[in-house]
Image: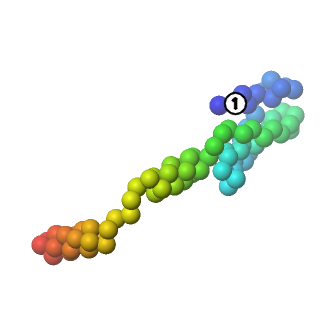
Amino acid sequence: MADTTCPDCAVEMDQIERTTFTGRDMREYQCPKCGRKEIIDCGKALWQILSDADENQVKTSPLPSPDSCISRSFAAKTFLAAY
């Protein structure tokens, strides 16, 4: 994680905002003593990493056949009917 000490006062800054809508984990800090604000890019947002991984998985895995979907559905109904 990035250093969040105010360069002017040497006081630990408080995190006042965090946004990830751009796909980056952006955090805004403010010094409680002098009021200085800094925005720090903490890297790729977790949701973006997971989304990229899911896209890669979808591209590399074949779609299930309709028969396998029907058989799984039938198996689930049969299992639930038994209880």
Q: Is residue 77 above or below residue 55?
A: below
Callout 1: helix, strand or loop? loop
In this orientation, which residue lies closer to the viewer: 26 or 62? Answer: 62
Q: Is residue 60 left or right of residue 48?
A: left
Q: Is residue 46 left or right of residue 16?
A: left
Residue drawn at x 12%, y 72% is 82
The answer to whether residue 73 shows anywhere in this view is no
**Rendering coords of residue 36 (x, y %):** 86, 37
Q: Is residue 82 above or below residue 48?
A: below
**Callout 1 crowding tier (Cα within 10 Å): few <14, some 14–19, many ≥20:** few
- How has the structure been colored for display? rainbow
**Quadrant placement of the N terminus:** top right
In this orientation, which residue lies closer to the viewer: 33 or 38? Answer: 38
Mark 1: which amino acid?
A: Ala
Residue drawn at x 32%, y 68% is 65
Residue at the left extreme of this rendering: 82
**Rendering coords of residue 17 (x, y %):** 72, 47
Residue drawn at x 78%, y 40% is 39
**Rendering coords of residue 37 (x, y %):** 83, 39
The answer to whether residue 79 shows anywhere in this view is yes
Residue drawn at x 19%, y 70% is 75
**Quadrant placement of the C terminus:** bottom left
* Numbered label tally: 1
Which of the 4 quarters of the picture holds residue 43? top right
The residue beneath circle 1 is 2
Which of the 4 quarters of the picture holds residue 10? top right
Residue at the top extreme of this rendering: 10
Q: Is residue 8 left or right of residue 61?
A: right
Q: Is residue 14 above or below residue 18?
A: above
**Rendering coords of residue 54 (x, y %):** 49, 53
In this orientation, which residue lies closer to the viewer: 31 or 52? Answer: 52
